[in-house]
Image (tube, rainbow, N blue to C red):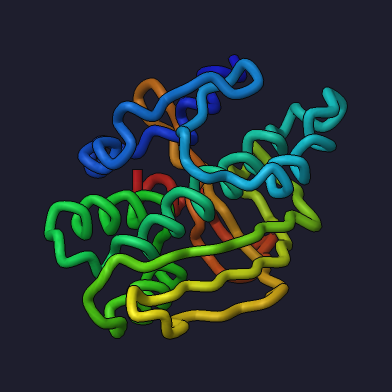
């Protein structure tokens, strides 16, 4: 069951299936689960360990935590910051496609507006994701997170494109069911306990 859920977090929806090519050969075992062999911080994943508690797992808090840290922030967003303005159209397109499979609506538009203003180039990205608070409800298909995030994006010529240090971020994630797998996506950059993820999933799925 856990393996299936974690694969659902990693593999994008059919419309974004091409993004898997970005790391097609990178599926490896991680603590008995499937994970992409991308630079994912041990600090971020360590924040998810408390949610392995079986008393909490009925709402899949651990799944949500790893979905955000590994799939959304440290794979999709990191890849978009790095390759979104690549002079290689293939790399830029795959990075954008994978990013758009994890970030929707307001969060997607805010980040794309930022990256699209950067000069052409493949950037260096350093980040740290600290999950401070998390709750989820499978019946509502909704998860709420609070994180502290540090991001530094440096252009090839060495100048800083983005510097964020310990920025507190509220996040609403929605679960989008699939035919075989489901995934959690970032729907809003705030904690919104009234956000209708059931309607969202029906529209976006």
Between 111 and 176, the one lying in front of the other is 111
The residue at the point 67 percent across, 70 percent down is 169
Image quarter of the N terminus = top right
The furthest residue to the left: 89
Image vertical order of residue 177 relative to residue 190, above or below: above
Q: Nearer the viewer, residue 87 or 93?
A: 87
Taking the spot 40% from the left edge, 61% from the top edge, the residue there is 104
Q: Position of residue 70 (x, y in %)?
A: 55, 43
Image height of 123 relative to 185, above or below? below
The percent coordinates of residue 43 (x first, y second) are 73, 48
Q: Is 152 placed above or below 12 here?
A: below
Residue under the image location 58 percent in, 48 percent down: 68
State the residue at coordinates (45%, 58%).
Answer: 78
| Of 69 and 57, the residue lying toward us | 69
Residue found farthest to the front: 157
Up/down of 104 relative to 141, above or below: below
Give x and y (percent) for residue 110: 42, 77
In the shown orientation, is residue 192 left or right of residue 92? Answer: right
Residue 118, located in which quarter of the rendered image?
bottom left
Q: Quadrant of residue 150?
A: bottom right
Count of numbered circles on the image: 0
Residue 73 horizontal/vertical position (percent):
53, 55
Quarter of the image with the C terminus is top left
């Amino acid at each position: 069951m856990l393996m299936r859920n974690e694969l659902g977090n990693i593999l994008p929806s059919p419309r974004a299936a091409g993004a898997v090519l970005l790391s097609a050969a990178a599926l490896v075992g991680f603590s008995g689960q499937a994970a992409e062999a991308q630079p994912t911080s041990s600090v971020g994943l360590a924040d998810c360990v408390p949610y392995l508690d079986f008393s909490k797992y009925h709402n899949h808090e651990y799944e949500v935590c790893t979905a955000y840290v590994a799939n959304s922030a440290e794979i999709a967003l990191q890849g978009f910051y790095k390759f979104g303005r690549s002079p290689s159209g293939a790399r830029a397109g795959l990075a954008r496609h994978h990013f758009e499979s994890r970030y929707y609506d307001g969060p997607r538009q805010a980040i794309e507006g930022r990256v699209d203003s950067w000069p052409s180039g493949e950037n260096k990205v350093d980040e740290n994701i600290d999950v401070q608070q998390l709750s989820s409800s499978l019946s509502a298909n909704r998860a709420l997170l609070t994180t502290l995030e540090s991001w530094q994006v440096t252009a090839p010529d060495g100048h800083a494109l983005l510097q964020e240090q310990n920025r507190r971020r509220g996040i609403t994630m929605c679960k989008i069911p699939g035919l075989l797998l489901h995934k959690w996506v970032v729907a809003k950059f705030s904690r919104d306990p009234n956000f209708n993820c059931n309607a969202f999933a029906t529209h976006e799925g």
